[in-house]
Image: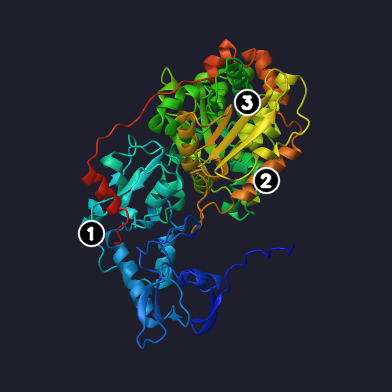
């Protein structure tokens, strides 16, 4: 039988020109896509190719084009205009430049002119475009219009400042189509148009789960984390306070590029050195607590399996906890009660560490550096505050940590790498390191669960069947003993999470253990990570591979082989899920479902407003 030839990609067409240069293009390719492929720059603001978003609302991607058979040229938006055979496109004519400049000037009419105080100063797509079009004035700027636009500071995690919004709708697209949360909507019309929360709610009480993915795609300072660098500076310069800092596994692989180091590089040593230069008294690793979480969650899983309770959902992701409580409270009994690594470390640092170091626990303040905005929301949960004292006092996102270094004049790139030196809570296993990526929690847990069941280590330590980047992945793992084969699943991103939760509730999903990470890719691309202008999830694979490399080089690759974790249980907790461990390291969840009543006309208005072009 003759071999069947593989399907070929449709041939590129010839005959079009951009700026006098012959170009080829593919079927359905837009003018903007074709220009980029030929290294020809066209400014954009609303468009973001990585999430397939090109609504044409900003109108700065204008080009002048002449179609075959036509004598006159037309002004078109390049992001949503397809190329045509024989088309002649000009991107830098005087008419195009003037219209682009006018459009940016109009965008600035109700935009707060506070660049020097904005969190995006120097890293703002609007500033870049204003420079490119040669903006020289802002004739239409109206402070009264700016004053009418809402600023929502109700959330402990995310600030929404509509005085800086350019109505690109990227955040709405991400929340609705990317994450499937659908908390953001377009409100009002004309000058009054702004992005709001569904049903007119505030950020704090809305259906938003503070995953922060909207922040990553925002081109300006309209969306950002609540900045708490001043609070940390207060701690650092207070001689009565003992400052303890922890940083997550994802921070060490997602921070270096901010200071000119290669994306995905492991900068753990420089972060330790930076924390010491800032003046932190004790530098700890959240990876240590990730190993503790595996001991607790793994033991809990075995207990549930022994009782025939399935599935068990992981509980380390605070965005996922918010999602479950607000959107699917029916699933809460299936969640592990083990706290997140951040909270476990905070609790241990205030209950265990003072006795070992001879310190006054009342003087300790725990600062957590996380790639996550939802972690800010987590530390104010009533369940995690005891007698008015929080387990973790402040969370800084990756972006805030970079801001703090600049404020304190720390030259990160020039720092000599340092090592952890705390003898109680700084060692970690390779299993703890891979917590930062999708599938990592599952793989770490199964390494230890296998040991507990069989009394020996898993021979093939890297469970490659659990790795991958699909939204939902499923696998079976032979654990042996009385457990046998376990059916596991991993979901990352809340749209795939919704699918798997609904399947579980409908009784159509057959799993024993399910890992959930709210952010696509896991913590390495959390809502608090560094922003990439004009890109989304730029370095996901590089960060992920570095974490796996850290695991391969680790002295211990299983959580139960971490000597400091062994000492913690021997000297303080007793054993996993002991009464003391349960009191310190486990939590409870709350049904926070939002009940709203909406008319058909209100729903229709929301749909039409969200597709409106301004």
Q: Is residue 233 visible?
A: no
Q: Residue furthest front?
A: 1
Nearest to N terminus: mark 2 or mark 1? 1
The image quadrant where one finds the N terminus is bottom right
**Height in image: 92 above or below 164?**
below
Q: Is residue 331 visible?
A: yes
Please rate how many residues cluster around mark 1, counting C-alpha atoms within 10 Å: few if below 14, some from 14 to 19, many from 20: few
The residue at 75%/39% (across/down) is 553
Look at mark 3 in the image and give the residue it sits on: 294
Return the residue at label 1.
190
Q: Nearer the viewer, residue 545 or 235?
A: 545
Residue 93 picture quarter? bottom left
x 26%, y 45%: residue? 603
**Residue at 45% of width from left, 35% of height from top?**
376
N-terminal label among 3 and 2: 3
Q: Which residue is mark 2?
A: 546
**For the view shown, which residue lies furthest in the bottom direction?**
71
Please indicate whether residue 83 sits to the left or right of residue 609 in the image: right
Q: Residue at x 28, y 49 (%)?
A: 606
How packed is label 2: few (under 14 Cα within 10 Å), some, or many (20 or more)? many
Could you say which is closer to the camera, residue 101 or residue 502?
502
> Where residue 549 sits: x, y (%)?
71, 43
Q: Earlier in the sequence, mark 1 or mark 3?
A: 1
Element type at marker 1? helix
Nearest the eye: 387 or 62:
62
Q: How is the image coloured?
A: rainbow
For numbered disc 3, what is the local secondary structure? helix
Relative placement, left or right, of 349 versus 322 is: right
**Residue 509 at x, y = what percent?**
53, 31
Q: Find the distance from the CA under tag 1 to the CA under tag 3.
A: 53 Å
In-front residue for pair 420/338: 338
């Amino acid at each position: 039988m003759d071999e069947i030839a593989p399907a070929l990609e449709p041939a590129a067409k010839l005959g079009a020109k951009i700026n006098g240069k012959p170009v080829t293009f593919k079927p359905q390719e837009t003018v903007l896509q074709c220009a980029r492929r030929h290294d020809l720059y066209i400014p954009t603001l609303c468009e973001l190719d990585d999430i397939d978003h090109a609504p044409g609302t900003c109108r700065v991607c204008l080009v002048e084009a002449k179609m075959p058979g036509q004598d006159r040229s037309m002004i078109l938006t390049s992001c949503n205009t397809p190329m045509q055979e024989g088309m002649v496109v000009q991107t830098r004519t005087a008419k195009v430049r003037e219209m682009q400049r006018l459009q940016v000037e109009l965008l600035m009419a109700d935009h707060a002119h506070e660049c020097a105080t904005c969190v995006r100063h120097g890293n703002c797509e609007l500033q870049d475009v204003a420079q490119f079009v040669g903006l020289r004035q802002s004739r239409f700027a109206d402070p009264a219009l700016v004053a009418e636009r809402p600023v929502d500071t109700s959330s402990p995690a995310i600030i929404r400042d509509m005085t800086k919004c350019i109505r690109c709708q990227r955040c709405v697209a991400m929340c609705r189509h990317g994450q499937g949360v659908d908390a953001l909507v377009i409100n009002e019309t004309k000058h009054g148009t702004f992005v709001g929360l569904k049903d007119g709610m505030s950020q704090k009480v809305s259906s938003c789960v503070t995953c922060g993915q909207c922040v990553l795609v925002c081109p300006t300072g309209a969306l950002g984390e609540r900045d708490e660098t001043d609070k940390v500076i207060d701690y650092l310069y207070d001689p009565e306070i003992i400052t303890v800092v922890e940083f997550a596994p994802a921070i060490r692989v997602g921070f270096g590029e901010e200071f000119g180091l290669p994306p995905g590089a492991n900068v753990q040593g420089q972060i330790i050195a930076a924390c010491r230069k800032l003046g932190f008294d004790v530098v700890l690793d959240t990876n240590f607590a990730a190993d503790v979480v595996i001991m607790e969650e793994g033991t809990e899983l075995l207990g549930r399996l022994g009782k025939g309770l399935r599935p068990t959902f992981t509980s380390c992701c605070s965005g996922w906890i918010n999602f479950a409580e607000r959107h699917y409270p029916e699933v809460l009994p299936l969640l592990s009660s083990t706290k997140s690594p951040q909270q476990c470390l905070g609790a241990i640092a205030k209950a265990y560490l003072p006795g070992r170091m001879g310190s006054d626990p009342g003087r300790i303040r725990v600062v957590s550096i996380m790639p996550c905005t939802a972690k800010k929301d987590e530390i104010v949960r009533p369940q995690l505050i005891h007698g008015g004292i929080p387990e973790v006092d402040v969370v800084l996102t990756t972006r805030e940590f970079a801001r703090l270094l600049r404020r304190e004049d720390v030259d990160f790139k020039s720092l000599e790498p340092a090592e952890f030196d705390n003898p109680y809570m700084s060692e970690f296993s390779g299993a703890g390191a891979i917590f930062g990526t999708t599938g990592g929690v599952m793989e770490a847990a199964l390494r230890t669960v296998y040991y507990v069941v069989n009394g020996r280590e898993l021979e093939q330590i890297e469970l490659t069947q659990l790795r991958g980047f699909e939204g939902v992945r499923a696998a079976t793992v032979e654990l042996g003993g009385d457990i046998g084969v376990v059916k596991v699943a991993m979901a990352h991103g809340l749209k795939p999470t919704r699918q798997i939760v609904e399947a579980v509730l409908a009784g159509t999903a057959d799993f024993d253990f399910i890992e959930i990470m709210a952010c696509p890719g896991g913590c390495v691309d959390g809502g608090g990570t560094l922003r990439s202008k004009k890109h989304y999830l730029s370095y996901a694979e590089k960060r992920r591979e570095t974490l796996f490399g850290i695991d391969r080089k680790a002295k211990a690759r299983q959580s139960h082989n971490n000597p400091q974790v062994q000492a913690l249980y021997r000297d303080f907790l007793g054993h996993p899920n002991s009464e003391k461990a349960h009191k310190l390291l486990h939590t409870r969840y709350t049904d926070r479902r939002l009940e709203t009543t909406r008319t058909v006309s209100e729903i229709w208005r929301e749909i039409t407003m969200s597709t409106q072009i301004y």
